[in-house]
Amino acid sequence: MHSTPNLAVDEDEIPTLVEVNLIHQHISPQYKLTVPLQAGAGLRISEALAFHTGCLRDDFIRVRWQISAKANREDCKTRLVPLKHRQEGEYRDVPVAPFIVDECHEREVTFRPIPLEFQDKAGRPRVVEVFFPPRDRGKGVMPTATTYAYHFRKAQIAAGLTKPDGIAKYTPHSLRHFFASTALANGVPIHEVSRWLGHKSIKTTVDIYGHLVPEAWDRCRDVMQNAMRPAVADSDESASTA
């Protein structure tokens, strides 16, 4: 047994691949793309809801904005705001698997993106074609992480992913945990995962996910054992007994 930092994610908070697929299967059709964007690319839900046609760049995603917490209000002008820990104009690029690219293209056909007019933090007018417009397009308001949470819980209940008390097992952020844990478990360096998650520093990533790096503890033990108590080579043993 070993202890982990207080920020460390509990393995029980990370859904399995089967559970991720169940959520994807049962979530409302207009929000299906949010699941691979979070679980397969590590986007925050506020970033996924701000996804627009300019994000997809062949085999990577350029994440530039996140949805404002006030975007569901009619009087909100800055519906898309800078990323967490970032300034206006800053962005991050995240590699995406082919299945995500395919699902993005399918989404464009099924739910055509619509123009969204807004002001950036500098007050400049902007227009982007968003993938997750409101149902009532005439209102001009956008879904937020709060309004999306209802659909995420509903999908889990429909899929039977609930705790004994009937509450949904996971939050949208759990899909981001899935992305990080899957990448680390398959040998992706933690500094790369940190950059793609958009963490302020790698320390944040290490504190949350460092304990999930496979074989890290055994590797450390082996390294220190070999460095400080190196095994005697067979030839040396033979020479000493000759």
Image (spheres, grey):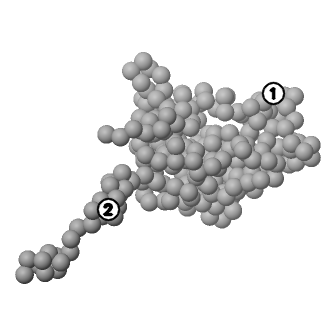
Separation of disc 1 and disc 2 at Cα? 63 Å
Q: Residue at x 92, y 43 (%)?
A: 123
Q: Residue at x 59, y 51 (%)?
A: 202
Outermost top residue: 165
Outermost right residue: 124
User: SS for tag 2?
Assistant: helix
- Residue 160 placed where, x, y %? 42, 29
Locate residue 167 relative to residue 101 in the image: left or right. Answer: left
Q: Amino acid at mark 1?
A: Arg
Residue pointed to by mark 1: 73
Residue pointed to by mark 2: 228
Locate residue 95 relative to residue 122 in the image: left or right. Answer: left
- Residue 114 placed where, x, y %? 78, 46
Q: Residue at x 18, y 78 (%)?
A: 236
Q: Residue at x 57, y 47 (%)?
A: 203
Quadrant assignment for the N terminus: top left
Q: Which mark is residue 137?
A: none
- Residue 192 placed where, x, y %? 56, 58
Q: Residues within 10 Å of mark 2 (few under 14, many from 20)?
A: few
Q: Amino acid at mark 2?
A: Met
Foreground mark, 1 or 2, reads 2
Locate residue 87 relative to residue 224 in the image: left or right. Answer: right
Residue 185's place in the image compared with 26, above or below, is below
Residue 114 seen anywhere in this rendered image of the structure: no
Q: Earlier in the sequence, mark 1 or mark 2?
A: 1
Q: Nearer the viewer, residue 113 or 151?
A: 151
Quadrant assignment, res 70:
top right
- Residue 228 placed where, x, y %? 32, 62
